Amino acid sequence: MSAIGSDDQDLTGATIDASNVLTLSIEDGASTTVDLSAYLDNTDDQTLSSDGSAGNLSIEDGNTLTLNVNDADADPTNEIQDLSLTGNM
């Protein structure tokens, strides 16, 4: 009879090779492999683009999102600050 919770092996390493095979090394045991090639169908390959207008962002085969980039008052002079340092930091 084996004790409950007695399998305390740790993963000691993981690598993925050029053919997309994941190899997991197990403490005091043999390595095991998983072929991940079937999951590489490029369905998540999408391109983000902008039409040049401020705040317009599009995703390939999707929608365009318009981000609000307005500064509320559109006055660039109130973004300027005069800072000074007296003493040491």
Image: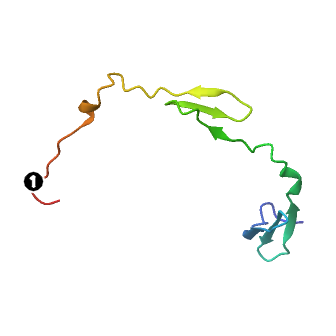
Compared across the picture, whether 71 is left or right of 61 comes to: left
Q: Residue furthest bottom?
A: 28
Q: How is the image coloured?
A: rainbow
Which x, y percent locates residue 51? Answer: 58, 32
Q: Quadrant of residue 17?
A: bottom right
Q: Residue furthest front?
A: 52
Q: Quadrant of residue 58?
A: top right
Relative vertical location of residue 3 with respect to residue 40 in this rendering, above or below: below
Which x, y percent locates residue 72? Answer: 36, 22
Q: How many marks?
A: 1
Q: Quadrant of residue 24?
A: bottom right
Compared across the picture, whether 4 is left or right of 47 comes to: right
Q: Amino acid at mark 1?
A: Thr
- At x 64% / y 39%, what residue is drawn? 48
Which x, y percent locates residue 68? Answer: 47, 26
Which residue is identified by label 1?
A: 86
Relative vertical location of residue 38 with respect to residue 15 in this rendering, above or below: above
Observer-nearest of 39 and 2? 39
Compared across the picture, whether 49 is left or right of 1 comes to: left
- At x 76% / y 43%, what residue is drawn? 44
Name the image quarter holding the C terminus.
bottom left
Q: Residues within 10 Å of mark 1 (few under 14, many from 20)?
A: few
Observer-nearest of 8 and 13? 13
Indicate the secondary structure of the residue bearing disc 1.
loop
Q: Residue furthest left?
A: 87
- At x 85% / y 75%, what residue is drawn? 30
Compared across the picture, whether 56 is left or right of 16 comes to: left
Which x, y percent locates residue 11? Answer: 74, 68
- At x 90% / y 66%, what residue is drawn? 1
